[in-house]
Image (cartoon, rainbow, N blue to C red):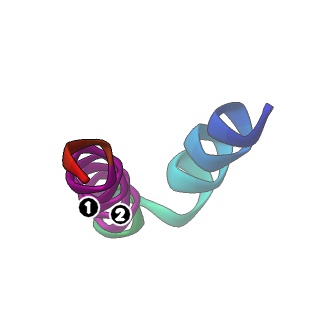
Amino acid sequence: MATRMNVANAKKLGSRHSKNIFTSILSRRTFYIVLGNF
């Protein structure tokens, strides 16, 4: 559900905000990978 809301918000606010969501998802994914290594 959270990802659907993010996509909807990105469509409303425009491409600039969608890039921010994309980078936040990437950073979050890398963060979990680092935690997994520990």
Residue 33, horizontal then vertical, whole percent = 24, 44
Q: Residue at x 73, y 42 (%)?
A: 2
Mark 1 vs mark 2: in front:
1
Say which residue label 1 marks.
27
Vertical arrangement, residue 38 with respect to residue 3, above or below: below
Q: Secondary structure at mark 1?
A: helix
10 relative to 17, above or below: above
Mark number displayed over residue 10: none
Q: Residue at x 54, y 65 (%)?
A: 13
Q: Give the residue type at disc 1.
A: Ser
Dominant secondary-structure state across the stretch colored magenta: helix
Q: Front-most of 9 and 2?
A: 2
User: Mark 1 to mark 2: distance in Å?
Assistant: 5 Å
Q: Which mark is residue 24?
A: 2
Q: Secondary structure at mark 2?
A: helix
Residue at point 40%, 59% (across, down) = 21
- Label 1: few (<14), some (14–19) or many (≥20) C-alpha neighbours in 10 Å: few
Circles 1 and 2 in contact, beta carbons < 8 Å: yes
Pick whichever, 31 or 26, lies toward us.
31
Q: Which quarter shows the N terminus? A: top right
In percent of the image, x 36 and y 57: which residue is there? Answer: 28
Q: Label 2 neighbourhood size at 10 Å, few (<14), some (14-19), many (20+)? A: few
Q: Residue type at mark 2: give it.
A: Ser
Horizontally, residue 37 falls left or right of residue 22, namely left
